[in-house]
Image (tube, rainbow, N blue to C red):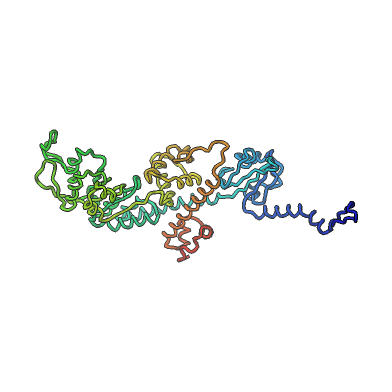
Amino acid sequence: MTVRNVSGKAKVTLLDPATHERAADRPARAEATLAAVLDATEDAVCVVDTDDRVTVWNRKAEQMWNIKAADIVGRNINDFFSNVMVTRVARDRRIVRGQYHQPLPGTHVLINAVPVVVDGTVVGAVSAEKDITEIVHLNRELTKASLEVRQLQEAVSQGTRVADAFHHLLGHHPRMREVVALAARAAPTDATVLVRGESGTGKEILARAVHDASRRAGKPFIVINCGAIPGDLFESEIFGYEEGAFTGASRGGKPGLLELADGGTVFLDEIGELPPLLQVKFLRVLQEKKFYRVGGCRPVAVDVRVIAATNRRLETMISSGQFREDLYYRLNVIGLSIPPLRERQSDIPELTYHFLHEYGQLYGKETGEIQPHVMAALIAYPWPGNVRELRNTVERLVVLADGNVIDVAAVPGQAPEPAGRPAAEGTLKTGLQSATEHAERETILQALAEAGGNRTLAARILNIPRSTLYYKMNRLGLLETGRGGD
């Protein structure tokens, strides 16, 4: 309390003993609180000063790195680790959020690190590291198990023509599965099919699968690229020609691609590029199953199934008079629309590992697994060239791999980060976590589907303990999935 005399000149200040005791106790309370926070967190916390000496090393750091606080506090952290992120943060005055880091071989972490600043001066840095090694290893094991399950499925399906025909169409995204299911239903018939999709989505693969699953399997599958054949040669290439039809015509004439496809399937790729005159003649073929060779007067009958494909909007072309409406309706009996890869990102890990295995065998290279930050980059990329671009990228990854190391620099759109420039805050964290968790979730769901919801069998398929499967399902919010036959 404060007491003033009557004149106001003298002043005596007295502190309440209890208040004095609380003020003196504050540093101790703050230190005890900080110690409790450091002990409670599940992140490994390290604090260094400007000389890179360790000043704080919590319980989780002791467990993660198997180094006691008594052995490291007061010593230079570079004596224990190389490639230390926390020292670079202090030196460069940068902030790191959720960045993938591998401080030791076989250990994977996500790190947050910030400099400690007092009155504008950096006096040290603090880092908090979350151990994701188990997730990385589980991703490898799940991927390996997924590949083995798929190979087993492929072996079993050899006796089933339809299943075998569509096994090249990889991916478990619902939209992709719907397309495959509809194609499988249409395959046994002779209905005309129109396949839509951007370039590189796999339209020809789907068309060939429909052919292989039909009664025409084993008969010719003739591909006609309507945009690649010169206009003046188109008719003779498609319908053939009679002897003497034009100067240079072969003796005896020549059958066209339609005749060569008799009994089988004709795949008209890029049907939107078909010249208007040929559109009329193709409409007649679809209606009558007959045509005339160039220079011929005798109709040629053919038994062919027609599958067409386009990456153009035929409805717009009809409005502008570039495509015949009656031909469109003859072609679009069964319409199949393949989604672009950017709209089914969950299929990217499966496709990537399939191509990795394929090109690893082709080039005789054991490339190992895709690192989490590489998979994150693959998932984040928009893939304008779709599955074809992804296949070519994985081939490049395999070719450029140094031993079994896959370099993220080979991924499209990835450039080395300039020295000293921090990554965009949250970008790596979001990409890595979403990539790892998404791949983990999809692989577990696939195993549960294969096991008919039986978690014990699913754990056996994944080659992990059932307790581990339960833990992962709980973390991913999947405990309501697959309740049958635990």
Tell me: residue 187, above or below residue 353: below
- Residue farthest top in this picture: 248
Q: Residue at x 49, y 50 (%)?
A: 435
Residue 267 image offset from top left, x and y in percent: 25, 47
Q: Residue at x 44, y 45 (%)?
A: 381
Q: Residue at x 29, y 47 (%)?
A: 310
The residue lying toward the viewer, choosing from 466 and 268, is: 268
Residue 462 image offset from top left, x and y in percent: 47, 55
The residue lying toward the viewer, choosing from 357 and 477, is: 477
The residue lying toward the viewer, choosing from 175 and 213, is: 175
- Residue farthest left in this picture: 297
Residue 74 image offset from top left, x and y in percent: 72, 42
Residue 234 image offset from top left, x and y in percent: 20, 40
* Total numbered badges shown on the rendered structure: 0
Q: Residue at x 61, y 41 (%)?
A: 94
> The N terminus lies in which quarter of the figure?
bottom right
